[in-house]
Image (cartoon, rainbow, N blue to C red):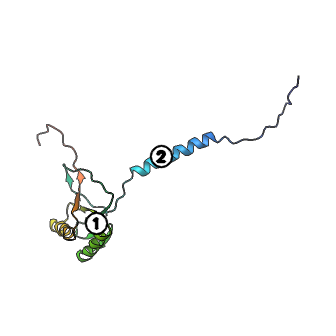
């Protein structure tokens, strides 16, 4: 019978299975976080609330924003109404089926929003949506 030595010399070894588990966990976490992120193309404004709002598909879209002061932004770029007409023409030529989302501050002039909507329609873009914030649910039976 052979007796093993008291101090056997073992080769060091890196266990990679726990490392693979950690990498897959991190990968799954990053994928879930990136899928839940919404790309905000517009400048931040205080959107008016609407009870009958529905989510819209945003595959090929541009965001038009109107601030409280009546300033116009196309995808975070400030411009005048004349510049907007030229840019909308360019967008329509590049993507004939483009959708425009109008983000208007709730304190913005209604006339400013109508001017922008009119310019969008004048350029032949028929897919237009007004971005709103969801209205908080009121308590049923509150009598208000």
- Residue closest to the eye, 48 or 83: 83
Q: Is residue 34 left or right of residue 119?
A: right
Q: Residue furthest right?
A: 1
Q: Is residue 113 left or right of residue 35?
A: left
Cα distance, mark 1 to mark 2? 37 Å
Where does label 1 land, which residue?
96
x then y, percent, for residue 108: 20, 65
Residue that appears at 39% across and 52% down: 37
Task: Classify the position of the C terminus by image quarter.
Answer: top left
Residue 46's tag is: none
Tell me if residue 103 comes above or below residue 16 in the rendering.
below
- Residue closest to the eye, 48 or 34: 34
Q: Residues within 10 Å of mark 2 (few under 14, many from 20)?
A: few
Tell me if residue 66 comes above or below residue 37 in the rendering.
below
Mark 1 or mark 2: whose residue is earlier in sequence: 2
x then y, percent, for residue 142: 14, 39
x then y, percent, for residue 22: 56, 43
Task: Classify the position of the N terminus by image quarter.
Answer: top right
Residue that appears at 30% across and 71% down: 93
Where does label 2 land, which residue?
29
- Residue closest to the eye, 91 or 77: 91
Pointer 1 and pointer 2: residues touching (CB < 8 Å)? no
Q: Is residue 76 left or right of residue 135?
A: right
Residue that appears at 43% across and 49% down: 33
x then y, percent, for residue 131: 24, 57
Instruction: Give the number of marks.
Output: 2
Kindly indicate the quadrant of the structure image that contains residue 40. bottom left
Could you say whether the residue bearing mark 2 is in a helix, strand or loop? helix
Kindly indicate the quadrant of the structure image that contains residue 101. bottom left
């Amino acid at each position: 019978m052979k007796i093993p030595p008291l101090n056997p010399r073992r080769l060091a070894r890196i266990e990679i299975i726990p490392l693979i588990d950690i990498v897959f966990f991190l990968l799954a976490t990053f994928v879930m976080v990136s899928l839940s992120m919404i790309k905000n193309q517009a400048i931040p404004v205080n959107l008016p609330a609407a009870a009958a709002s529905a989510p819209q598909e945003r595959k090929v879209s541009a965001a038009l924003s109107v601030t409280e002061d009546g300033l116009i932004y196309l995808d975070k770029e400030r411009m005048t109404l004349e510049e907007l007409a030229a840019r909308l023409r360019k967008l329509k030529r590049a993507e004939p089926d483009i959708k425009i989302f109008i983000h208007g501050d709730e304190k913005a002039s209604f006339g400013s929003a109508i001017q922008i909507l009119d310019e969008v329609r004048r350029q032949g873009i028929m897919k237009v949506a007004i971005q709103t914030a969801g209205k908080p649910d009121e308590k049923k039976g509150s009598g208000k």
